[in-house]
Amino acid sequence: MNVHRISLLGRRGNTISIVASGKGPVLFLLHGFPLDHRLWQSQLETLSERYHVIAPEMGGFGQSTLEESGYTIADLADDVELVRVHLASEQKITLCGLSMGGYVAFEYWSRFPGNLTALILANTKPTSDGENARVARMAMAQRAVEEGAWPAVSGMMDKLLNQTQENAKSVARQTTEEMLRGASASAISAAQNAMAGRRDFVADLPRIAVPTLVIGGQYDALATPEETRDWAARIPGARLEILAGCGHLSALEDPRRFNSSLAAFLDSVAAIDLS
Ligand code: MLT
């Protein structure tokens, strides 16, 4: 496995840092908040045996830089398009986004539907924020700037992972803490502002015509299985998998199950393409 890092200059003067691996049909992986490419470490290792896996780091996270003016979720979708043009020889892509990455994936679908072979929406939701969620985001953004990044996000540890004994000691927990501790105050603030202003895609769901897999986590408190079942049913023909034992970070909590769901779905999409 040859995991390598590439940097591209974004249209807003930002540097987009990308971790990529493998050869084959192109699979983009978009991480959640306030994470980075390490969310996808297993997918970069395993799925790269069959796919060209491309994991951009978004808006100030990992080694990507943050422009002073901040960004919108639509700007992040434009960054994905720029990466596709440069690294995927303009091929069509499968786009997989987890949580905030899913918000970017919805936006990418609305802007560039013709560039997608398939969509994977993991631990995410199509709804925009209500007033309380916006207020909570602004409070976290302010706390990050005033008190520092870790005090602002440390409380997320318990919300991101399924709180079982086994998980508490696991690699998933360690990696999650490393990512949270690595996030900067400015990236946290910018992402919270962008998510607070994101579009609502609920009314668009019946128009999603690209093959779609929706993945949820049995114990996901941030994108609950009940809500996930409800909106997934509005996407024509979408496949739904609720991963047993997982919280919000299913790709990290049960990579084997996540990867096999994803691979089985992509096989079914390839079979449709060939028929
Ligand atoms: C994420 O995991 O990306 C966040 O929980 C998304 C959000 O804050 O809405």
Image (cartoon, rainbow, N blue to C red):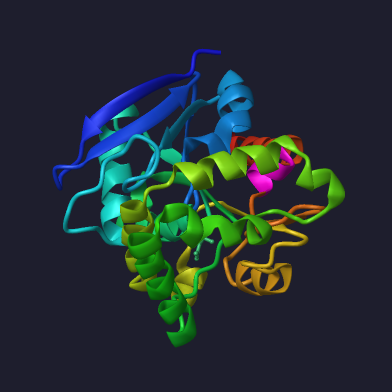
Q: Residue at x 72, y 73 (%)?
A: 226
- Residue 175 visible, this angle: yes
Query: In the image, is 206 to the left or to the right of 157?
Result: left
Q: Which residue is drawn at 33% across and 33% down?
A: 17
Does the stretch in magenta take in 254?
yes
Q: Magenta residues, as a range?
A: 250-255
Q: Main secondary structure of the magenta part?
A: helix
Query: In the image, is 109 to the left or to the right of 13?
Result: right
Does the stretch in magenta take in 83?
no
Residue 25 image position (x, y, % from top left): 48, 28
Q: Residue at x 64, y 50 (%)?
A: 249
Residue 270, by quadrant, is: top right
Image quadrant where one finds the N terminus:
top right
Image quadrant where one finds the C terminus:
top right
Residue 234 image position (x, y, % from top left): 59, 72
Residue 154 image position (x, y, % from top left): 56, 56
Q: Which residue is drawn at 77% across and 60% down?
A: 218
